[in-house]
């Protein structure tokens, strides 16, 4: 049987999964390499571990939502990600959906309180 | 070679060739940036132990590599219900076929006894089902995500939906399978397909000559019974048609039993073989009690079925 903290962790992860995609698409309105993106999100209150972020970036790239290129910065090879046109459309659509969901959740809460 | 390179090299060995260098380069760059950040915070270079702590935080190279790899499943999540349904049908079909094959095989091997044939047949069912399971799983693995559930059920129409049955009115598939196997074996036994004996000492039932006239009718009832069992296995819920057919079958069985009841000494038991053979007539009251027992069970079962019929 799943104990309470473990169940809560799973639920939180499920909730974060979709939200993280949205956060990454929003953040990549400016180009970022992996580490700088992670720090950017962290400084704004969203902790993401590397094991989640890098595979996610690759997945989004394979879906043509992002594009990337290797660049030499400060004497170091870095893979820089940027939002593609498809990614930008997805970002707009997801933001709209997020706002609708948020409103719906607010309505539900109000109705049940 | 420093710790970061050793770590990246270890991760690389667990990655597929197509992404190996790309992921390793990005990982190394990320680790170097993280070290720079920590060194900047501390105002000094990281010690070996601090670098090793960082690597421990990142996790075992195999796990890090696993995050970059697709997680293939033998059966895709969306097709799993279809897979499960096909698996059930396949096992049922194998069981039915194996029982039929066993019956046919026994015709040519008259000395094989029921209790020898039964475990062999059960083993064949298990054996063939395992093969079938492996093949079906392989097919679904190869299909992967190329076939979607929507494609498979594109031609589905709501007209094919079954009537709603109240909860608890589903038919147990185990019960139906047992019923089918017993009916098949009884039919085979009654028609001398398998020997009417038990154990080392042959024990056989001797049927009076009158049985020959009734045998086609008994066989008809048994075959209809088998067909009903197969239908119940394929669609395990009660319908009015199924109930009516089963009730009709019970009536037919009772008529057959009433006919047998009127005969004088319809059955005898023969024990042994050769010179030591002994034959005993089954007393009439045994037959009466047997028929009465069946009658009670049939009446109770019919009452339950009639109630079920009215509830539909």
Image (spheres, rainbow, N blue to C red):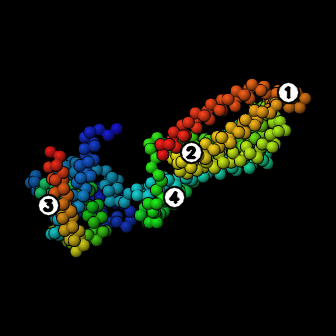
On whether disc 4 and disc 2 are found on a single subunit, the reply is: yes
Please indicate whether residue A27 sits to the left or right of residue B244 in the image: left
**Residue under circle 1?**
B278
- Looking at the picture, do discs 3 and 1 lie on one chain? no
Residue nearer the viewer, A16 or A79: A16
Q: Nearer the viewer, mark 3 or mark 1?
A: 1
Q: Secondary structure at mark 3?
A: helix
Which image quadrant: the N terminus of chain B? Answer: bottom left
Q: Are marks 4 and 3 on the same chain?
A: no
Vertical comparison of B149 with B271: above or below: below
**Among numbered discs 4 and 2, the one appearing first in the sequence:** 4
What is the spatial separation of the Cα atoms under label 4 and label 1, in whole angstroms? 57 Å
Q: Nearer the viewer, residue B35 or B49?
A: B35
Pointer 2: what residue?
B243
Q: Residue at x 66, y 29 (%)?
A: B293
Q: CA distance from mark 2 to mark 3?
A: 69 Å
Disc 3 target residue: A40
Question: Image quarter for residue B74?
Answer: bottom left
Residue at image coords 54%, 40%: B306
Q: Return the x and y of residue B19 as percentages of the image width and height.
A: 34, 66
């Amino acid at each position: 049987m799943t104990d309470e903290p473990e169940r809560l962790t799973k639920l939180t992860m499920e909730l974060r999964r979709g939200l993280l995609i949205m956060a990454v698409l929003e953040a990549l309105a400016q180009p970022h390499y992996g580490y700088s993106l992670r720090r950017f999100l962290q400084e704004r209150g969203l902790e993401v571990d590397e094991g989640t972020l890098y595979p996610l970036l690759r997945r989004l790239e394979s879906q043509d939502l992002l594009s990337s290129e290797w660049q030499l910065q400060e004497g170091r090879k870095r893979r820089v990600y940027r939002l593609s046109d498809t990614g930008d459309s997805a970002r707009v659509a997801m933001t709209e959906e997020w706002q609708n969901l948020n409103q719906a959740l607010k309505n539900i809460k109000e109705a049940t309180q | 070679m420093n710790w970061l390179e050793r770590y990246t090299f270890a991760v690389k060995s667990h990655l597929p060739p197509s992404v190996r260098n790309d992921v390793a380069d990005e990982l190394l760059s990320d680790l170097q940036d993280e070290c720079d950040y920590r060194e900047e915070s501390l105002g000094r270079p990281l010690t070996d132990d601090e670098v090793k702590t960082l690597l421990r935080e990142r996790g075992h190279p195999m796990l890090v590599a696993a995050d970059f790899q697709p997680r293939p499943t033998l059966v895709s999540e969306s097709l799993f219900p279809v897979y499960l349904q096909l698996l059930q049908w396949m096992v049922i079909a194998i069981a039915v076929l194996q029982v039929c094959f066993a019956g046919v095989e026994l015709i040519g091997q008259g000395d094989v006894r029921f209790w020898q044939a039964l475990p062999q047949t059960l083993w064949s069912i298990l054996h063939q089902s395992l093969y079938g399971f492996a093949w079906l799983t392989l097919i679904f693995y190869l299909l992967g995500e190329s076939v979607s559930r929507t494609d498979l059920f594109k031609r589905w129409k709501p007209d094919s939906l079954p009537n709603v049955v109240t909860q608890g009115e589903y038919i147990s598939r185990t019960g139906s399978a047992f019923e089918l196997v017993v009916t098949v074996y009884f039919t085979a036994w009654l028609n001398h397909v398998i020997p009417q004996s038990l154990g080392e000492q042959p024990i056989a039932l001797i049927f009076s000559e009158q049985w020959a006239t009734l045998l086609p009718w008994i066989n008809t009832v048994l075959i209809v019974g088998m067909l009903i069992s197969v239908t119940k296995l394929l669609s395990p819920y009660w319908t009015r048609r199924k109930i009516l057919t089963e009730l009709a079958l019970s009536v037919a069985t009772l008529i057959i039993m009433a006919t047998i009841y009127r005969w004088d000494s319809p059955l005898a038991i023969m024990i042994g073989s050769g010179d030591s053979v002994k034959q005993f007539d089954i007393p009439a009251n045994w037959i009466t009690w047997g028929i009465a027992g069946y009658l009670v069970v049939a009446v109770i079962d019919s009452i339950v079925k009639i109630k079920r019929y009215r509830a539909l």
